[in-house]
Image (cartoon, grey):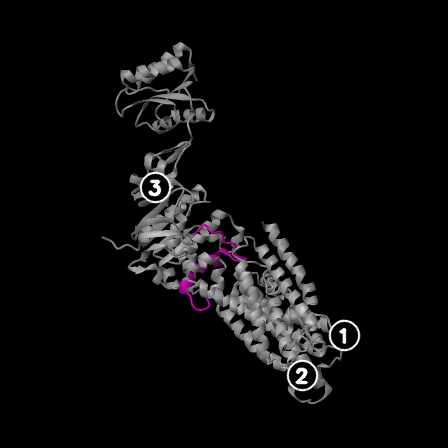
Amino acid sequence: MQETVLTANDLAVGYGSEILIDNIRISLLPGEIVTLIGPNGAGKSTILKTISRQIKPLGGAVYIGKEELAAFKGEELAKKMSLLMTVRTDPELMTCREAVGAGRYPYTGRLGILSPEDKRAVAEAMELTDVSLLADRDISRISDGQRQRVMLARAICQEPKILVLDEPTSFLDIRHKLKLLDILRRLVREKGLAVIMSMHELDMAERISDHVICVGNNGIEGQGTPEEIFTKERITALYGIEKGSFEERFCTAELAPPTGEPRVFVIGGNGRGTGVFRRLQRLDIPFAAGVIHENDIDFPAAKALASRVISEKPFEPVSYENEQAARALIDSCEQVICSIDSFGSMNAANGRLRDYAEKQGKLRK
Amino acid sequence: MKKETKRYILGYTILVLLLLFLMAASLFSGSVSFSPEEVIKVLTGAERGTTAANIILSIRLPRMLAAMVLGGGLAVSGYLLQTYFANPIAGPFVLGISSGAKLTVAMAMIFFLQRGIPLTSGALIISSFAGSMLSMGFILAVSPKVKRSSMLVVCGVMIGYICSGITDIAVTFADDSNIVNLHSWSMGSFSGIDSEDVKAFSPVIFICLGAAFLMSKQINAYRLGEVYAQSSGVNIKAFRVGLILVSSLLSAAVTAFAGPVSFVGIAVPHLIKKLFKTADPKLIIPAAFLGGGVFCLMCDLPARILFAPSELSISSVTALAGAPVVISIMAGRHREQ
C-alpha cells in the first residue's frame, strides 16, 4: 500500500462560516491523477482552494503526507504543492520568463536572484509546456491559452510533489488541451507527481483520470474509477441534464432530439447514419432509425436523437420481428433515407427494407 | 553583455548624473548666485562664518538634501502602494495618505504650539505616521468593497479632501503667528527645513528604503497576484503588514517636514519603469529612490527661483510635471483594454 501524499478526512469547505460541502474524503497517491467533476458553483474550486490553503477548512483536516496542512510554513508547503488557478493575473511589465521564474521563489535567497540551476529549471519547464518562444514576451500581451501554459510552467518549475489545477484545460485549443494532459501524464508517470484538478471536459476527464470525484449540488455524489463514474445515469443526475443527453460510450454530449412522431426513417449502420441523424436533428425533423446493431457506432447517436430505434443484438442477423417493426415504421413515415450501400449477412434485412421503401416511392437519396 | 543589463546600467548612469547635476544646481542658484569655487570652499570648510557659508550650509544644503531624500521616499512609497493595490495610479497623495498625515501634524502643531511647547522632529514624524495610518485604515477598509481600482482612487481623493477640509478649518482657528508657518507647509514645501530635520528624517527614510529593498523578493512574487504569491511561499499577512507600514512610514516622514507633495509617488515609478522597461522591484526600488530625488530637485528649482523672493508651493510644480504622466498612464491602459 502506497502512502498518500494528500489526505482529507471529513473535510468541510465553504466561505466565511457557511459550509458549502462537507464529508469530503480525498486520498491522493503519488503517480495518480484525481479529477473533480460537477456542475458550476457546486464547490470544486472551493475544495481545491481549501486543500491548497487559500481558505481555511470549516471542519475536518487536510494532511500533506502525515503532517497537517495548517502546520506547514509557506516555503515548505511551496516545495510540496504548486497551483494553477483560474484567477487572471495581469502584472505590469513582466516577461513570461519572469513569471515562470516566480515559481522558483522557495528555492532562492533573500533577494530572489535565480541561480544557474534555477534558470535551467525555468527553461526546462517552459520547454515542456511549449512556451519557450514566448519567454521574452510581456505576459499581459499573450492569449489566455498561452498564459495558461506559462502559468503551468510556473507551477512545474516549483518542483512540487502535488499539483493542484483548477480547470487547467479551459481556454486551451484542442492541440494544447491534449498537450497539457500529455504533460500531466508524463509528470505523473516519470516524476511520480500527484495531480488533483477540476475539469469540465468530461471526455478528457474520463481519459486522463485515475480516480474521479463527483462534486454535486448536494455534496459529494460519489467517487471511483472513470468506468464507474462516467455512466449515463450518474452524469445525468450529477449535472441535472435536462436538454440533450450524456452519451457514455464516447463520453460526449448529444443535443436534445426532435420531438413528435417520426416523419423520416433512416436506414443506418457502419457509422454512416450518424451524419444523417445530426442533420435531421438540426432541421428539427423527428425520425426513426433502424435496423442498427447495438455494437454499431451509429447506435449511440441513434439512441440519443431518434424518436424510435429498431436495434438488434450484437453479432446476430436482423430478426424477423425487427424487420417487420421496421416495415411498419416505413409505412408511417413520409420519407426513407438509406445511408448505407453495402449489405452483408448480418444486415441483409436492411437491403430488403431499402427495396421496400423504393417500391413505395419513399426512398430519398 | 545582455541587452537588458546594458539598459539597466544606462538607466542608473542617467539617474546618478542627473542627480549630481541637480544637486549642484540647487546649491549654486537662488536669489543669490554663487560661483562653484565659493560653494566648494564652503562645503570643504575653508570658508566659515560668511554670508555665503550661512546661506549654503543652513538653507540650501538642508533643502537640497530634503528634496532629494524626501522625494526619493515618496517615489518608493508610491511604488509600494501601486504594488499593494495592483493599481498604477495609487500613491500616497491620491490615496489621501499624505492628507491624513497633514491633518494630524497640523493638529499636533496647533495643540502644542498654542501651549508654547516646541515640537521635536520625532514628535512630528510620530503624529504624521498616525495620520498616515488613519487614512490607510480607511483605504484598506474600503478596498475589498470596491471592484474597480479606479474607484479606490476616487475614495482616496475623497479622503484627501475630507482631511484637507478639517485641516483648513483647524488652521483658520489657530493663532495668527502659527498660521503663517502652517500655511506654506500645508501646501507642500521644502523651505524651512534645517539640518536638524535632515538628521531626523534621513534615518527613517533610509531604514524604510532598506526594508523595502529586502522585501523585493516578496513584492516580485506578489505581482502575479495574492494566490500565486502565497502558493510560492510568501507569508501574505506578514508581507501586507510590512508593505503597509513601510509605505505609510515613508509618506509620513515626508509629510511631516515637507507637507503633502503631489504626484511624485505616481509619476516617478512610472517613468522609471518606462526607462528600465521592467518592473522588477530589485531594480526599481533603488532607481525610484534616485528618480524621486531627481524629480523633486528639478521641481524645487523653479519653485524657489521663478518668482523669487516669493516661493511656489512644491505641489504646484510637481502637479504640473506629474499630472500629465498620470493622464498618459490612464490613456495607455485604456488603449490596451
Residue A120 vs residue A212, the one in the foreground:
A212
| A102 part of magenta stretch | yes
Snapshot quadrant of residue A158 = bottom left
Query: Most extreme residue toward the left, as rendered?
Result: A1
Query: Which residue type carries mark 3?
Result: Arg
Q: Which residues are magenta?
A: A85-111
Is circle 3 on the same chain as circle 2? no
Would you say A50 lies left or right of B3 here? left
Q: Which residue is mark 1?
A: B308
Q: Label 3 lies in what chain?
A: A
Under circle 3, the secondary element is helix
Q: Which residue is mark 3?
A: A207
Label 2, label 1: how far apart the Cα atoms are:
20 Å
Residue B181: image location, x then y, percent: 69, 76
Task: Kindly tell me whether residue B7 is visible in this rendering.
Answer: no
Residue B83 vs residue B45, the one in the foreground:
B83
Label 3, label 1: how far apart the Cα atoms are:
80 Å
Q: Label 2 lies in what chain?
A: B
Residue, x 27% and y 24% (percent of image)? Answer: A313
Is circle 2 on the same chain as circle 1? yes
Would you say A210 lies left or right of A201 here? left
Query: Which residue type carries mark 1?
Result: Ala
Q: Residues within 10 Å of mark 1 (few under 14, many from 20)?
A: few
Q: Residues within 10 Å of mark 3 (few under 14, many from 20)?
A: few
Q: Which residue is mark 2?
A: B57
| A233 part of magenta stretch | no
